[in-house]
Image: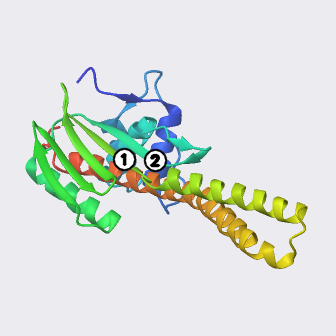
Amino acid sequence: MTDERKYQEEEVKEIFDLAASNRSEVGLPTLPDEGLTLSQLEEVGAEVGMEPGRIAEAAFAVHTRREVLPRRTFAGVPISAGRVVDLPRAMTDREWGILVGELRETFGAKGHVASHLGIREWTNGNLHAFLEPTATGDRLRLGTEKGNAAGMIAAGAAILILALFLIALFVFEELGRASLVIPVLMALLGSGTLVANVIGLPRWAHQREEQFEYIAGRVGALIGETASPDG
């Protein structure tokens, strides 16, 4: 096909790095100015013992990585993560079933499967995977958010501010050390809540993005594995 996507030098290097995994580094072929197609990349990979499926999965991951959704934040801390994956064709019922199995295994949750108006979905609380039809195939939307994160951060900040105010007031009024016990405990509670979220939420967002990247790669491999031999 004349309109088949062609990968440039940086993309080719990244594809082979991903596909090589624990293998020794693979030398890059001399690239024509217009780049290499997926089938050409698979031919090069076959020469060094790489399975075409690994090349296809890596190429798909490189292509879809550009569509990571920006994180929503609250007070500078991420509270969401997401990815959009455009598929070159519509997924079959069997492929969707396999994808649901991958989602359940990856996130350790059965979730809920539904379909309406041509849109398929798998949801588990705020975690979701929507498969929407497009003019050329399907679009997979993966996303999640920490529903209580904003409230916890705001509550922690409010408790800490109130505690500091009470400590200052009690010291000014010279009410004695005993009166400071409750405000100090409140300050510890508020600061602990803030620290837990400031440290924990970026880790949570990074983990979810890695899981979404894995799912995107598996979708690419799935589409490639079930394509026709001539495709």
Task: In this rendered view, identify the residue nearer to me: 6 or 156.
Answer: 156
- What residue is shown with label 2? 80
Residue depicted at x 33% and y 64%: 106
Residue depicted at x 54% and y 43%: 73
Looking at the image, residue 30 lies above or below residue 80? above
Q: Residues within 10 Å of mark 2 (few under 14, many from 20)?
A: many
SS type, badge 2? strand
Q: Give the x, y percent position of residue 193.
A: 61, 63
Residue type at mark 2: give it. Ser
Residue depicted at x 21% and y 62%: 101
Going from N to C along the chain, the mark reached first, 1 or 2, is 2
Residue type at mark 1: give it. Gly
Q: Give the x, y percent position of residue 221.
A: 28, 50
- What residue is shown with label 1? 143
SS type, badge 1? strand
Asked if the residue under mark 2 is in contact with the one under mark 1, i.e. CB atoms within 8 Å, the reply is yes
